[in-house]
Image: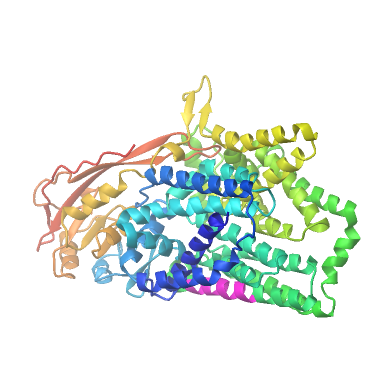
Amino acid sequence: MTAPERIVLGLVVLALAAGLWASVGLHTPWTVLPTAAVGIALAWRVVPAPARVTVAERRGAAIALAGAGAWAVVNAVMYAEYLIVVRDPGFLTLAGLWLVDHPDSDIPSLGAIDAASVDGSVLADASQAWNLRGDAVQPQGARMLSALIATGGWVAGDLGVLVFNVIVGAVGILAVYALSRRMLGPLASLAPAAAVALSVSHIGLSRAAYTEPLTLVLVIAAALWLWRGVEDRHGGALALGAAASGALSFVRIDGAAYAAGLLAATVLALALAPGSRARRGGAALAAIGVQAALLFAGYAALWRWSEGYADRLADQAVTLMIGYGLLALALGLWALTWIGGGDRVATGARDLLGRRGAIAAGAAVSGLLAVLASRPLWMTAHRGTDNSVDQFTNSVVGSFQASQGLPIDPTRTYAEHTVAWVSYYLTWPLVLLGILGFGLATTWMIRRRPGWALLLGAVLPTSLLYFWNPEVVPDQLWAFRRFEPATLPGFAIAAAVAAWGLCDRVRPAWRARSRRIAAGAFVFLPLTTWVSIAPGSDLPVSAATPVFVREMGGAYSQLEDLCAVAPDRPIILAGTSSHFGSLRVMCDEPTVLALAALEPDQMARMADTWDAAPVVLTRNPEWFEWSTEPAVVVSSTVRQASYELQGIPRTYFDRAYSWYAGIVGEDGVLVPVEPEDRTVVTSP
């Protein structure tokens, strides 16, 4: 019965150990694994062993374990080869590969800075994803996910790194099951877990190294343990929940937004809970202290290990930190007053609301979500054109609209469709049930059980924030990342709460049948999104490519072949910035990026930087002078899902690559590398 939650516990502690050691530059098997083992032993009792286990509890846990295990196996077979940096999983995966054999994520430039000084068009880093700090190149973003998937590399090499996020996704399913059990029965809890498991978004985002599945695990596990800490008066669970939620800043730069909702919900639940005011106030202060300490440590680590990225988003990050700090301070000051009766602010409001007020509050929450869902009927959201980021995003959106035959309106954000985005993956019936379920949870929090605040605090703050303004390029699955960590599991759980609540109101003779129908709906409805039937269209029958296509299939073989073209030589990558980090990490050779044609004397000066003559890898042979006509040395295709603005991707494209290679001679003229049969077959 406790096995699903204990697996969640093990992954969370391993992630904490990996992320914390990476933040101090000591990420090795000899630091991370013993720390994780000690942490799991210390936290073992956070998951209580029941005195008596029913048949339903044993069956529910067994089905959850078998289902998550089967899900992991199937999706591990289809793991993504996201090693070319088109979007975030590229640099996150490469940082994970680097951390397998290195204690920190700073990648030495090894002379690349001096080589790049020959011309302004030559760089020792690559914009956005790879930034210089001193004489090292830093991958973009927080480090916990990369540090965690690197532990898979200690066991199974590169394959272990590529597959590990699938394991994280499987554990996320178990986390949803474990949290649901505080609200539903052991068998009913399988329904929301199944809905998440079968959603195209959870499948697609888990196969590549997206941060969202790990964020989901931390958010849902934190809600579970904080709820237990409040309701069962369990100090260890409260501390672990606070640590898991505080560690969100080690995963994502917006971690404070998730942490703030969980913190506010925890303090409110403690204020409403029965028991000694001194004990409850002390518990609130402890939760605030643990969460805040880890949260700010995560932001400090972000600035240390990804300074360029943190500086670019400094305005947003600082605003989040200030907002979180003010909230934590206000909640802490309030908790200090509880010993003198300050908690009556919450209990008095609850008593004043009464039954009718609680129902009205629940109706208001459901009504707000319904209004947000209705926005396509009465508004169209647009972004500005004033800054370079907006201008770039507008150009991307315009190109997507043109390729899909949509009206050209590049400033559209599609933010009015954000609730509809959830329906792409869960379907409208489950979304509408979720809207009802959040209203019921609000009512029950006020009238029955303060712990319901943890579900609301884990899900609604960030959901409402991103429903209104997602701040993302609006193609799927990319845009739905905003809603994977909390909104997707939250709506699935809330929908199950509403569905089983409705089942309890039917005649007793029909109740069992209605529950079976509800359970079937949570499996069947997400499955309907896997296939689209549109008679008369160009594609009358199409399937969800994130489910049936290996993302970036062919990338790993391409990079292996490029590294084998001229091993043990510095690399001059000409014209293709997406491969800069890929070559630097996988070939483990100093790499510079040339963005324009170079003269032979410039090439010769670059070559003088290193002891061995560098190899030029390029798809633009016309940029250079060659001793003889070069031939293609690596020919490859890489398969990717298409970009869809108003639906799940159901097509794919094969990107063809033809690479030329030459060794820089003493006069700067390139001597072509002799081609071999290096054609890469695209993965199915």
Q: Which residues are magenta?
A: 289-301
Query: Where the C terminus falls, by quadrant?
Result: top left
> Quick one: which residue is furthest to the front in this view?
52
Query: Where the N terminus falls, by quadrant?
Result: bottom right
Q: What's the residue at 24%, 48% (across, down)?
A: 620
> Quick one: which residue is furthest to the top in this view?
536
Inspect this view and state whether residue 636 appears. yes
The percent position of residue 175, horizontal first and vertical second, equals 57, 54
In the depicted structure, whether residue 389 falls above or below residue 267: above
407, 144: nearer the viewer? 144
Residue 430 belongs to the span the image colors magenta: no
In the depicted structure, whether residue 357 falls above or below residue 275: above
Inspect this view and state whether residue 382 appears. no
Q: Quadrant of residue 133?
A: bottom left
406 left or right, relative to 621? right
Q: What's the residue at 10%, 60% (across, down)?
A: 665
Q: What's the residue at 48%, 70% (across, down)?
A: 302
The percent position of residue 73, horizontal first and vertical second, equals 41, 45
Residue 297 belongs to the span the image colors magenta: yes
183, 667: nearer the viewer? 183
| Mark count | 0
In the depicted structure, whether residue 486 falls above or below residue 200: below
The percent position of residue 330, horizontal first and vertical second, equals 73, 74
Q: What's the residue at 53%, 58% (across, down)?
A: 8
The percent position of residue 228, horizontal first and vertical second, equals 67, 63
For the stretch drawn in magenta, the main secondary structure is helix
325 left or right, relative to 556? right
The coloring applied to the image is rainbow
Q: Quadrant of residue 548?
A: top left
21, 229: nearer the viewer? 229
